[in-house]
Amino acid sequence: MKRAWKILIGILLAVSLCIGGYLLYDRGRPAPVPMKQTLYEGIVYRRIVRFTPHAMIAHVIVIDRKTANVAFLVTPPDQEGDLPLKARTTSQFLDEFNVQIAINGDGFDPWWSRGPADYYPRAGDPVAPHGFTASNGNVYSTGVLERVGTPPTLYFTRQGYPSFNRRPNKVWNAISGDRMLVTKGEPVSGLDDSTLEPRTAIGINSNGRYLYLVVVDGRQPFYSAGATFRELAELLVEQGAYIAMSLDGGGSSTMVIEGEGGKPVILNSPIDHYIPGTERPVGNHFGVYVNP
């Protein structure tokens, strides 16, 4: 009898540890359930869940510029010099600049992650974006060409009209990316179709009316493995993108909206230092003012 009780207690302890471990690992993550929600007039959020060929959870915000009353913001510089930005999480960016929607932006330097205590940047550390960057009419980075070549760039006029890789006479906001994903409504040829990672992307439709913001969760077994660049491009095409580029991915990929009381609400499951729900401080961001 005592042996049976010991076995039962052992089973209960094992189950409790498994449940506790799962709850700790799963804390704060969005349920892997498809959903559609109107955030504001002309702005719709979708959570897309797939199980084949691997687990993938994608978060898509579609902005109808004709219907929605919006303005855009790329992170302004904090200082002059070679490292014009202070690293912030996407939630910190949304809170500081009072935007209603935000995603992480371009890649940045310096950056390293050698362990839980040996990483850069922390919030407030100086960094520089990889590509051409402008905020509210101020061009503060022309890019690190010797490191990344000529990255793709999404430009915005003061009226908020977007255009890829065609610099307008007066740039109001501009953000650069990692690579083109979609051109003329088709995935770019030669995109990687094997490496699964968290991803962030931005795109527009053929006449610039619709803006697509996409974040894919990754590096989280049994939840979301991530997406290849090819899968990311195909997802954008399915949503209606005519031209699109990827932004910084991996532990940087984050999508945030303004919640009750103006508090940031993270829509996805970012992962930094392999901890789900942990935001990485990044260089710049793309933000949306709604009813500014």
Image: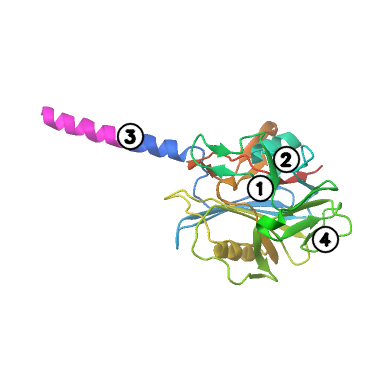
* Inter-mark Cα distance, 1 to 4: 22 Å
- Looking at the rendered structure, the kind of residue marked 4 is Arg
In the displayed structure, would residue 254 be above or below residue 195? above
Of helix, strand and loop, which one carries label 2? strand
Q: As rendered, which of 67 and 56 lies closer to the eye?
A: 56
* Inter-mark Cα distance, 4 to 3: 56 Å
Query: Is residue 261 magenta-colored?
Result: no
Of helix, strand and loop, which one carries label 4? loop
* Inter-mark Cα distance, 3 to 2: 43 Å
Q: Position of residue 138 (x, y in %)?
A: 84, 46
Identify the residue at image location x=73%, y=34%: 96
Q: Residue furthest front?
A: 146
Q: What stretch is highlighted in magenta?
A: 1-17
Q: How would you rate the neighbour count of disc 4 (Cα within 10 Å): few for under 14, some for 14-19, many for 20 or more?
A: some
Question: Mark 2 or mark 4, which has the lower sequence index?
Answer: 2
* Inter-mark Cα distance, 1 to 3: 40 Å
Could you tell me if the residues under marks 1 and 2 are in contact, i.e. CB atoms within 8 Å? Answer: yes
Specify the quadrant that holds the N terminus: top left
Query: Chief secondary structure of the magenta span?
Result: helix
Write down the residue under mark 1.
108
Write down the residue under mark 3.
17
In the displayed structure, would residue 196 be above or below residue 286? below
- Looking at the rendered structure, the kind of residue marked 1 is Phe
Q: Where is residue 173 in the image (x, y as percent from the top left)?
A: 80, 50
Q: How would you rate the neighbour count of disc 2 (Cα within 10 Å): few for under 14, some for 14-19, many for 20 or more?
A: many
Q: Which residue lies furthest to the right in this view?
A: 169
* Inter-mark Cα distance, 1 to 2: 10 Å
Write down the residue under mark 4.
167
- Looking at the rendered structure, the kind of residue marked 2 is Leu
Write down the residue under mark 2.
85
Could you tell me if the residues under marks 2 and 4 are in contact, i.e. CB atoms within 8 Å? Answer: no
